[in-house]
Amino acid sequence: MIRFLLISIFLIFFSLGIGQVPRDSAQAKGPTEIDILFNYYEQDGIHSAVTGGQGTEELRDMAAKIIVHVPLDTASAIDIQGSINQYTSASTDKIDSYVSSASIKDAHANLIFAYSKEIIPNKLSWSVFAGGGIESDYISSSFGGGLVWNNPQKNRELALRLQVFLDTWIVIFPEELRAPGLVSLPTDKRRSYNFSGTYSQVINPRLQASVSGELVVQQGLLSTPFHRVYFQGKELPDIERLPALRIKYPIGFRVNYFPTDFMVLRTYYRFYYDNWDLLAHTINVELPIKPSPFFTLFPYTRLHYQRASRYFAPFGQHLSTEEYYTSDYDLSGFGSLKVGMGIRYAPVFGLLRFKLRKGRIGMLKSIEIRGSLYRRSDGLKAWTTGLNLGWEG
């Protein structure tokens, strides 16, 4: 906990330092913008994949994220995003038989750099990014780029994006399966390729809509090596085994309607299907309301239904003749409901103002707090709370 807070504080001061990089204000596209986010998540359930589909899913996660946007001139900018998560999981502690072993705690750190530039002012721009992440059992690197086109009236936009993720696992087997020759894996690599496109249209002053589609191709180690699977008539489990290829086809539709000047109805529907035969429908609804020019309240809800993957079966129900198998309830069939509320305060002249170098003024321009409850039909329940501080300088 103390280490997490110290690293979070370091990220804050690092981001504020970036925000004070001197530049010619006459050439700057705008002020440096910094978002500092904190999030706490807690869950519990009775279907841990680590212990074969039964057992505690208790988990607590603390996260801090810094997002920095720095305009370089009227046409280009850099973006930096850094995050750190620290979690405590009773589920992963069951990889070994030792109570309170090192596997009960873990951390994840991620850093991404991006550069964007307008080719044709207010019409066409491109961007590139690169980054990486690390956790106790894997190392990841990523890169990609995108194009954004706007029509002259700025009421239509087409955005295309390509992302590549290269992951390497540090393979950890369950304790009872670590004897030489007992289990093995063909690779410790995972490759993911994500191509996405979004078309947005302003239909009239009160109605906006967009459609998005993705093609996601994953290859390599797509199972989790320390997830156990138990079979009918067998006492000793095996590790989770899934195909080395997964192709995902999500499609999304978004509609925003402004019935009044102080209210917005935001709706989103997503259809998902993949070659593991997992099919899902998701509906999000958010209703931001502005009781005053500075305050925004936004209740929101999310409904989700999915059909189980063909490779899923509960504890002890798989057959030893099957080629692929998992008891991870994230791949099971279930319905879920998430409800939450947020509040944002953003006065015109900010909440806090301070002087930066060369006479520039920085300020804390907004504060946002969110909280939500989550329930799943398989018994998983969770709650989360978050804080977002918006800075400008």
Image: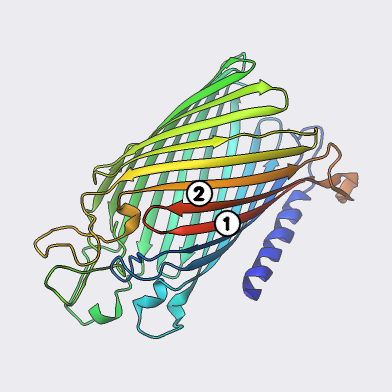
Examine the image and state in which quarter residue 99 appears. bottom left
**Which residue is most to the bottom?**
98
Q: Three-letter amino acid code at disc 2? A: Ala
Q: Which residue is mark 1?
A: 384
Residue 145 is situated, as x and y percent measured from the top left of the image, at: 48, 38
- Kindly report the distance in space between the C-alpha atoms of the residues bearing marks 2 and 1: 29 Å
Q: In this figure, which colouring scheme has been used for the structure?
A: rainbow
Q: Three-letter amino acid code at disc 1? A: Thr
Q: Which residue is mark 2?
A: 130
> 327 or 382, which lies in front?
382
Total numbered badges shown on the rendered structure: 2
Residue 119 is situated, as x and y percent measured from the top left of the image, at: 58, 26
Viewer-side label of 2, 1: 1
Q: State the residue at coordinates (67%, 43%).
A: 69
SS of the residue at dot 2? strand
The answer to whether one can see residue 199 in this image is no
With respect to residue 267, does 17 lie above or below? below
Binning the other alpha carbons within 10 Å of mark 1 as few (below 14), some (14 to 19) or many (20 upward) gives some
Q: State the residue at coordinates (29%, 60%).
A: 223
With respect to residue 167, does 390 lie above or below? above
Give left or right: position of 49 versus 292.
left
> 173 or 367, which lies in front?
367
Q: State the residue at coordinates (55%, 63%).
A: 85
Q: State the residue at coordinates (11%, 65%).
A: 320
Give left or right: position of 35 versus 392.
left
